[in-house]
């Protein structure tokens, strides 16, 4: 079972993840795309990455806006390295760089 990260480990990990925030026991980020098709394309790419890692995001999508929430259910809905790794992978294919 994955171990929850300490506050300092989470803060350190977030330093490398632009736009990601801690919301209680989860990592979150909102992406705003040009239109629904672009948002859905991002979600399709996300689905493949989640399956590859065996770790899945909570996804909220309305029109061109996608909000992701990451926590590890196997660790009591806490933030683990799995969440930081998935967020980093998302940033790797995210084309909305800030």
Image (cartoon, rainbow, N blue to C red):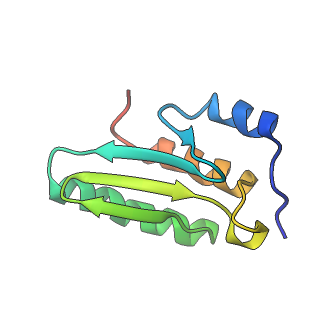
Q: Residue at x 33, y 37 (%)?
A: 96
Give above or below for 9 relative to 90: above
- Where residue 68 sits in the image (x, y, percent)? 45, 55
Q: Position of residue 55 (x, y in %)?
A: 61, 68
Q: In this image, 15 relative to 31: left or right?
A: right
- Image position, residue 17 (x, y; %): 56, 35
Q: Name the outermost residue toward the front.
A: 24
Q: Hey, which quadrant is residue 29 in on the image?
A: top left
Left or right of 69? Residue 55 is right
Q: Is residue 48 left or right of residue 81?
A: left
Q: How many marks?
A: 0
- Residue 70, quarter of picture: bottom right
Q: Quadrant of the C terminus?
A: top left
Rendered position, 91 above or below 52: above
Query: Looking at the picture, how far across and down is residue 35, in whole percent?
Result: 14, 51
Query: Which image quarter holds the N terminus?
Result: bottom right
Residue at (71% x, 54% y) in the render: 79
Q: Is residue 15 positioned above or below 33 on the image?
A: above
Q: Which residue occupies 33% across, 54% down?
A: 66
Nearer the observer, 12 or 43: 12
Residue 16 in the figure: left or right of residue 95:
right
């Amino acid at each position: 079972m994955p171990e929850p990260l300490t506050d300092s480990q989470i803060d350190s990990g977030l330093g490398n993840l632009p736009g990601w925030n801690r919301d209680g026991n989860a990592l979150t980020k909102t992406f705003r795309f040009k239109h629904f098709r672009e948002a859905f394309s991002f979600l399709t790419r996300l689905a493949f990455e989640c399956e590859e890692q065996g770790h899945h995001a909570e996804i909220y999508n309305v029109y061109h806006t996608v909000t992701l929430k990451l926590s590890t259910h196997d660790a009591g809905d806490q933030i683990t390295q799995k969440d930081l790794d998935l967020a980093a992978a998302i940033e790797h294919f995210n084309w909305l760089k800030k």
